Amino acid sequence: MSLKDLIKEVIERGIYYEDALILKSLAEKLHFIENGGDCGVIEALEVGTLLGSLRNRLLYDEYIKLENLVLDIIEKSLLRKK
């Protein structure tokens, strides 16, 4: 499942406005990293903070899928650097 598909699924299920803003910020940050942007300490902290703020706002399976997607994107970014 891609990040776009997961976000679409969450929004179709129904989500509060402020949660949607957090999800949008996370998606923008991940899109930047995925497309060759730097993933340094600051970016990783920002992504972690955004992800953590969604922990109790999403369904458990949605959160786990999102967490796995985030880890995959960051891992690929770090492997590109080597």
Image: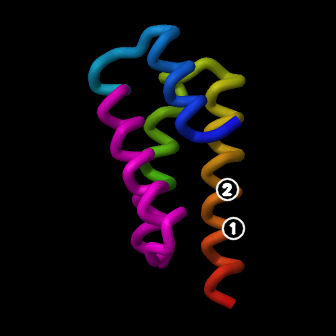
Checking the image for residue 26, the label placed there is: none
Magenta: main secondary structure: helix
**Vertical order, 25 against 29 (above or below):** above
Q: Which residues are magenta?
A: 20-46
Q: Quadrant of the N terminus?
A: top right
Residue behind mark 2:
71
* Disc ID at residue 75: 1
Q: Amino acid at mark 1?
A: Glu
Q: Residue reaching furthest top?
A: 13
Q: Is residue 31 left or right of residue 21?
A: right
Report the residue at 44% width, 51% height from top.
49
Q: Residue 79: image x %, image y %? A: 71, 79
Q: Inspect the image, locate mark 2, and give the three-letter code of the amino acid beneath it.
A: Leu
Horizontal and vertical percent for residue 71? 67, 56
Question: Which is nearer the eye, 81 or 48?
Answer: 81
Residue drawn at point x = 53 percent, y = 63 percent: 34
- Quick check: is 35 in the magenta stretch? yes
As measured in the structure, the alpha-carbon distance from the residue carrying label 2 to the one carrying label 1 is 6 Å
The reply to whether the magenta stretch includes residue 70 is no
Asked whether 9 or 52 is in front, the reply is: 9
Q: Quadrant of the C terminus?
A: bottom right
Q: Residue at x 58, y 40 (%)?
A: 3
Callout 2 touching callout 1 (CB < 8 Å):
yes
